[in-house]
Image: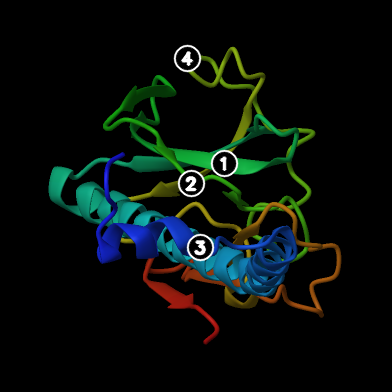
Amino acid sequence: MKNLSPHSFGRVLRPAFSLIEIIVVVMIIAILMALMTPPLLSVMEGNRLTQSGQGLLFRVSMAQQMALTDNRPVELRFFHYADDNGFEGYHATQIYFYDEASNDQEPIESPLYFSQGIMIPDSPVSPLLSGLTEDAPAAEKEPFKSMGAKYQRIIFYPNGSTSINAPLRDAYLTLCAVRTDTSDASVPPINYYTIQIDPVNGSTKSYRPN
């Protein structure tokens, strides 16, 4: 018979975890995950919101600058459609050169899609775009045509002015999470990114709550 060394004998006799101990550990892990998940999701959502807001702010500035440098109107479109989860709102933008004489639009860049779970709601928190989708034109080109998208537009002119027909206090839009209740403009969402566009000179301001 093969003799066991003291070390191997110790390994043979080492006690294992009992079923009760394993259940307790699993329960503790589950409780910790339940406590950590909401804050973690909020942080991830905030990062996506900031990324989308900064991307849109850059597109607005780029459209204004291109109108000045190319000496021709530039159009920024906001596309309204339902996302994969059925949430309706403005989920993407795209910049076009705009020919006033022929009413033709030439895309300058690929569409900018907001991050997953982020949109501009068609609600009072975005007065620059709210309440206009019923009369808005349908998208004529893909990929938005097959989505049944409608769009609103802001035109930036070479002289620095815009097509915005609203006072400065209403010339803003707000990005927020799709699950946010935005039915009341007097109660801002918990997490949001607001961009204001001056109708006269096209300058922008942004606000992101801490």
Name the residue: 32% across, 26% down: 107
Q: Nearer the observer, disc 2 or disc 4?
A: 2
Residue at the spot of label 2: 114
The answer to whether the residues at label 4 and label 3 have Cβ atoms under 8 Å apart is no
- Asked whether disc 1 touches disc 2, contact meaning CB atoms under 8 Å apart, the reply is yes
Residue under pointer 3: 44
Report the Cα–Cα distance between label 1 and label 2.
6 Å
Separation (CA) of disc 3 from disc 1: 18 Å
Q: CA distance from mark 4 to mark 3?
A: 30 Å
- Label 1 sits on residue: 91
Q: Which mark is residue 142?
A: 4
Q: Position of residue 177 (x, y in %)?
A: 65, 58
Work out whether mark 3 precedes mark 2 in sequence or the reverse, and give the earlier one: 3
> Given the image, on which type of amino acid does mark 3 rest?
Met
Up-down: is 39 above or below 68? below
Q: Quadrant of residue 128?
A: bottom right
